[in-house]
Image: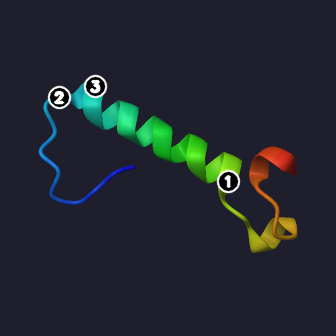
Amino acid sequence: MIHRGKPWRSVADVELATAQWVASYNQEGLHEALGYVPPAEY
């Protein structure tokens, strides 16, 4: 996940962390507009 104040070593590190966060959000995050299911299951 992306943490504030974390010292990033490169842009690639930021891109990887962002991609991991998006995947987690889409796989695990429950969304009210989708009937409280993750987007991946909708």
Q: Amino acid at mark 3?
A: Ala
- Calculate the distance from the C-alpha at mark 1 to the C-alpha at mark 3: 24 Å
- Quickly name the residue at label 2: 10
- Calculate the distance from the C-alpha at mark 2 to the C-alpha at mark 1: 27 Å
Which is closer to the viewer, label 1 or label 3? 1
Q: From the viewer's perspective, is 1 left or right of 11?
A: right
> Element type at marker 3?
helix
Up/down of 26 relative to 15, above or below: below
Residue 33 location in percent, x, y?
80, 71
- Quickly name the residue at label 3: 12
Up/down of 36 relative to 1, above or below: below
Q: From the viewer's perspective, is 10 left or right of 28?
A: left
- Calculate the distance from the C-alpha at mark 2 to the C-alpha at mark 3: 5 Å
- Quickly name the residue at label 1: 28
Q: Amino acid at mark 1?
A: Glu
Which residue is found at the position 84% from the left and 65% from the top?
34
Residue 16 location in percent, x, y?
38, 31
Residue 4: image quadrant is bottom left
